[in-house]
Amino acid sequence: MRMNISVSLTLAAVLFFTAGCASYKFRSSVPEELRTIAVPVFENASGYPEIDAVVTQYVLREFQREGTFKVSTLDNASLKLLGKLVKTDLQSLNYDRNFGSRTSEYRYSLVAEITLIERGSGKLLIDAMPIKANTTFLTHGDMLTGMQDAYPRIAKELARAITDAVLAHW
């Protein structure tokens, strides 16, 4: 009798805690026919060289890592993601104690606009949506090197935000 009560209580607890999970889906809500994506190199209007290639590379990696979309060529993809790096901003955070006016740490912001197009119909799914990412970097007396060292970090943050925005469309 005692065994039946503990089994019944355990079963009741399991049913109670899993009741809210009945509507949860373990598969993507993106239609199967739209799960291939092409990402041409982003356009660079940021004023900083080479950041476009770095961001594009990280966006491709993030789509591969996330797994909903298969990265494909432009001719074979059902979706085309166009990106444009439109704005950068540097904000001084800390100053060098030895040189009062020399900045030693910056906040680096990068804004991209993304457009998602269904290739077959030409339908615009996302139109020039702004996506922003931030990171910080130390200059150690050489701002250009510090900024270039920050490229992978800001590209990774931007890529995650872009992938999330594309997935949120569905």
Image (tube, rainbow, N blue to C red):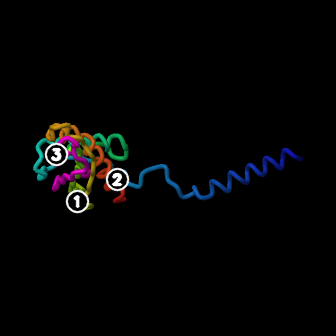
Q: Which mark is residue 164?
A: 2
Which residue is disc 1 drawn over?
121
Q: Which mark is residue 90?
A: none
Mark 2 or 1 closer to N-term? 1
Q: Decide: few, some or many residues near mark 1? Use Cα within 10 Å; few <14, some 14-19, many ≥20.
A: few
Q: Are marks 2 and 1 in contact (CB under 8 Å)?
A: no
Q: Nearer the viewer, mark 2 or mark 1?
A: 2
Q: How far is disc 1 from disc 3 in space, using C-alphas?
A: 53 Å
Mark 1 or 3 closer to N-term? 3
**Which amino acid, mark 3?**
Arg
Which residue: 37% across, 54% down? 30
Q: Position of residue 15 (x, y in %)?
A: 68, 54
- Report the predominant secondary structure element of the magenta stretch: strand
Q: Position of residue 72 (x, y in %)?
A: 25, 42
Which residue is disc 3 drawn over?
102
| Most foreground residue, 134 or 19 | 134
Establish if 51 lies above or below 162. above
Q: Is 97 on the left or on the right of 31, as rendered?
A: left
